[in-house]
Amino acid sequence: MIITDKNSADKGKTAIRIDNLTVKYGEILALENIFLDIKEKEYLGIIGPNGSGKTTLLRAILGLVKTFSGHVEIYGKRPGHTGKLIGYVPQITGLNRMFPITVKDVVVMGKLKSRISLFHKYKNEDMNLANELLAKVGIYDLRDRLVSELSGGQFQKMLIARALAINPKILLLDEPTASVDVTSKNQIFNILEELSAEMTIILVTHDLLAISTYVHSLACLNIRLVYHGKTEIDEQVIDQLYGCGCPVDLLAHGVPHRVLREHGEEE
Amino acid sequence: MPATVFQYNFIQHAVLAGILASVLCGIIGIIIVEKKLLMMSGGIAHTSYGGVGLGYLLGFEPIIGALVICVAAALGISYIKRKKGTGFDVEVGLLWSFGMALGILFISLMPGYPPDLSSYLFGNILSITKTDLNLMTLMTFLIIFTVIALFNYWKAYMFDEEFMTVMGIKTAFFDYLLFVLVAVSVVILIRVVGIILVLALFTSPTAIAALLTRSLKLRMFFSVLIAGLFCLTGLWVSYVLNIASGATIVIISVLVYLIAQIIFILGLRSKARNMA
């Protein structure tokens, strides 16, 4: 059963419509019967246990996985045919961090033409934009460094700048604060908070504190969509999401605070 | 090697072939290593044996047979890669053996004494003909043009292919193109170091260049220079000692790589000691 917070179902244009989406990897069910409407300029956090299909949902929106049934629309377009509507910040674990390339060269990649052109050269305005975006995410001074010299937090900020170089209407981020220190984490969330006024943001995270502090709406996923609505959720949702005897500590006002390693463990 | 030997056509051909091979190894080797496509390149290389056998059996230039079979294998492997994503070692391994088996079968079907294919397996830079050289020159220029003309795209493809897909860039095009380029490079290198030894020439110069510089363009440049050094030194040593040229080139490549790695590790340790 999906619990929907009717009050938070705001009016406004739909940016992404997911209609009865099911995704399978062979025989393994990754997502089942997902219905989700994401409004324009919504700042949505997606939480769920490991293997709950969070990354798969992002990849379905991006057109990077084959859907088993149902469909996804981004401003009425099919995934994979959205041109530069979507900026994507992937998990850094999948990238070659030793690749010999400078930070500025990575960011300016966002200005590559979708239609392959021979002898493509970046314009001066592309390089200026890359510099502006690096300043915006706070790593302008590192622009000529190699990516192999960046910390996890700096690398994430560079990927955010690259995604912004596309000038997207929607920004998807897959665990951008995984394995970064607290200062970088807060900086990244502040950047996203600022961006949320300009674009739709979908943030996959395990950071429940961020959910309660920064994002504006929440989707709880566990193969199926358990909840979509305001960030203040109750124990019933948490139980559905993480199972009975759930390892989630709740704050007094009902906002999940953190996931404990073992049930009953104190903070 | 005395200067007089350069009056011989086969030596001139060998030197030119070594230079062309170096250019390819330097450029394509970087892409193969950064995209971690070494085993797939090995698979493509070994299928070419089937083409060589087919060429002998049907009476056309074996290197053309190798080119056709290699390109077909490359397209097949890139199709499987796109369908399966990761974990297609089984298919690559099977294709690897299948190509070799086809070569052996075709040769065994030939009437009379079977030809000696060891120059295709282990290379013989001294046996390169004018036709081989023309074909190598044409294909080298084709590869250089493809890499330079699409350099910014290749850079993005090597760093984060998925991001290109999200931006609406047809990465399938780059997948197929890269594998075809690998196939063409393999065919060029077959005459220099042979089907079995080709992987060393793709990796060793690239890996040494990676120790010398962190810039992608410079890495390609150094890689070309180092590969050239290996090919020409190997050619010279094999001529002087009258030993197999392909094997000599590969042994030099591997030994120099090992020495470079040892020097690099010792350098790192001494740097760490100085900092402590």
Image (spheres, grey):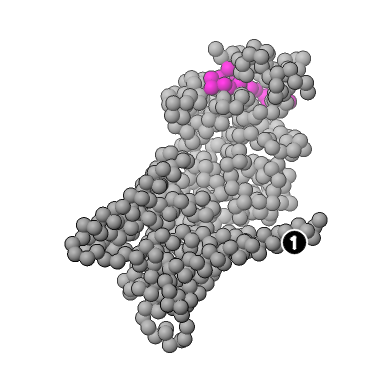
Q: Where residue B187 sits in the image (x, y, percent)? A: 37, 61
Q: Is A109 left or right of B248, judged from the image as shown?
A: right
* Most foreground residue, A109 or B195: B195
Dot 1: element: helix
Q: Which residue does the image show at 46% across and 46% down from the upper left?
A: B171
User: Can residue B173 be spotted in the picture?
Assistant: no
Tell me the amino acid under the disc marked 1.
Ser
The residue segment tinted magenta is: A212-229
Q: Main secondary structure of the magenta part?
A: strand
- Residue B108 against residue A208 in the figure, above or below: below
Count the labels in the image.
1
Count residues near mark 1 (Cα–Cα under 10 Å), then give few for <14, some for 14-19, many for 20+.
Answer: few
Q: Which residue does the image show at 55% across and 46% down from the upper left?
A: B160
Q: Where residue B273 sits in the image (x, y, percent)? A: 78, 58
In the picture, the quarter occupied by the C terminus of chain B is bottom right
* Most foreground residue, B113 or A201: B113
Q: Which residue does the image show at 40% across and 47% down from the upper left?
A: B93
- Residue A35 against residue B7 in the figure, above or below: above
Q: Which residue does the image show at 49% across and 21% down from the upper left?
A: A32
**Extreme residue in the bottom direction:** B4
Q: Any magenta on residue B149? A: no
**Extreme residue in the right direction:** B276
Q: Quadrant of residue A170?
A: top right
Q: Is A158 left or right of B79, judged from the image as shown?
A: right
Q: Quadrant of residue A42?
A: top right
- Check the residue under mark 1 and report the chain it is in: B
Residue wearing tag 1: B270
User: Can residue B146 be spotted in the picture?
Assistant: yes
Q: Where residue B109 sits in the image (x, y, percent)? A: 21, 57
